[in-house]
Image (spheres, rainbow, N blue to C red):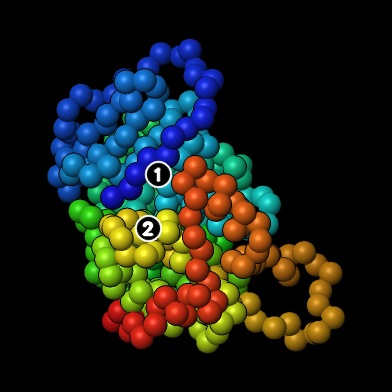
Amino acid sequence: MARRARSTRQDRSSSPAPTLPEGDVPVDTGTARVETDPDAPRRVTLHVNGVPSSCLDLDDPGFLAFEYLQQMAAVVELLPPGPVRAVHLGAAGCALPRQVEHARPGSRQLGVDVDARLLTLVREWFDLPRSPALRLRAGDAAAVLATLPAGRADVVVRDAFAGDATPAHLTGTAFAAACAAALRPGGLVLANCADRPPLTTVRREAASFAQALGPGAVAQGRLAVVAEPGVLKGRRYGNVVLAGVTPVPERPDPRGSDDPADDPGTVDLLDVRLGRALRSLAVPVTLLAGAELARFVGTAQPLP
């Protein structure tokens, strides 16, 4: 489902290797297994039902191995500096929440996973931020999302899978609208979509988010698709990141406000810094937005 990027980190901790389980461990949805990198004993990969779901370096909370998570982190960096309020739908081993807390200390995050036993175990196995920095909640992602206060989150991440596909009820315009409702104006939604040629699902998911994010989402550059060129060209199966920004209402006073609290900041997906960051990753990727995204989506219809 996701490929790992090669790390250049050299400073390994001298602390003893963690006590981790051997073989498969029963969880609510099946089995979990933790594999240790033989060349880096503090680097582990969590497999859920045989699928690599998270990779963590227990000495380096800023480490992200999966390339699509690196891409998501690059987009999050466009938010104004400082702590963020983030919701992660599909927590698994919480690699991205660890990285966000490392990069933005003081953040308040919620990780949601359908597997309650798995959440208990990853707390035991991995060095995760404690509550309230990172709260873990067991439950269906859509059901939990519906209970969240409206307009509060800075970031909502959808990274939930059943096998190698996103559960159908976590796709479509209604789900995208629920994500947008949880976000403040100018907030960021990120969705991991794994697809095969001819990328029909990605195109329809992009159409769904375009509809949910309101008029002008594509034309205004508030929606983008990020992936390796080979995936976008339909040459192979791979992960595609959808990034969307909720609209910011125009100020009634054209002079604006001097109070920083009145302007929490927004993300500009056309910011040259994002393109530069994406090109500088170990595996460079392409960002499609504006007219390029419109051509990519074409006549694809939103998912129901």
**61 to 235, vertically: above or below:** above
Identify the disc placed on residue 230: 2
What separation in Å lies between label 2 and label 1 (alpha carbons)? 17 Å
Between 39 and 255, the one lying in front of the other is: 39
Indicate the position of residue 219 as horizontal and vertical percent values: 56, 82
Residue occupying the point 17% across, 33% down: 25
The percent position of residue 282, horizontal first and vertical second, equals: 49, 42
Residue 158 visible within the image: no
Q: Is residue 124 left or right of residue 82?
A: left
Q: Nearer the viewer, mark 2 or mark 1?
A: 2
How many tags in the picture? 2
Q: Secondary structure at mark 2?
A: helix
- Circle 1 packing at 10 Å, graded few (<14), some (14-19), many (20+), is many
Residue at image coords 37%, 17%: 17
- Would you say 109 lies left or right of 171 here? right
197 vs 265, nearest the viewer: 197
Q: Residue at x 49, y 17 (%)?
A: 13
- The picture quadrant where one finds residue 22 is top left
Q: Is residue 283 above or below residue 10?
A: below
Nearer to me, 254 or 197 = 197
Residue 105 located left or right of residue 145: right
| Position of 302 relative to 262 (above/below) | below
Q: Is residue 246 above or below residue 89?
A: below
Q: Amino acid at mark 2?
A: Gly
Residue kind at label 1, given as amino acid type: Phe
- Say which residue appears at 62% left-offset and 68% top-offset: 270
| Disc 1 element | loop
Q: Name the residue that disc number 1 marks.
A: 66
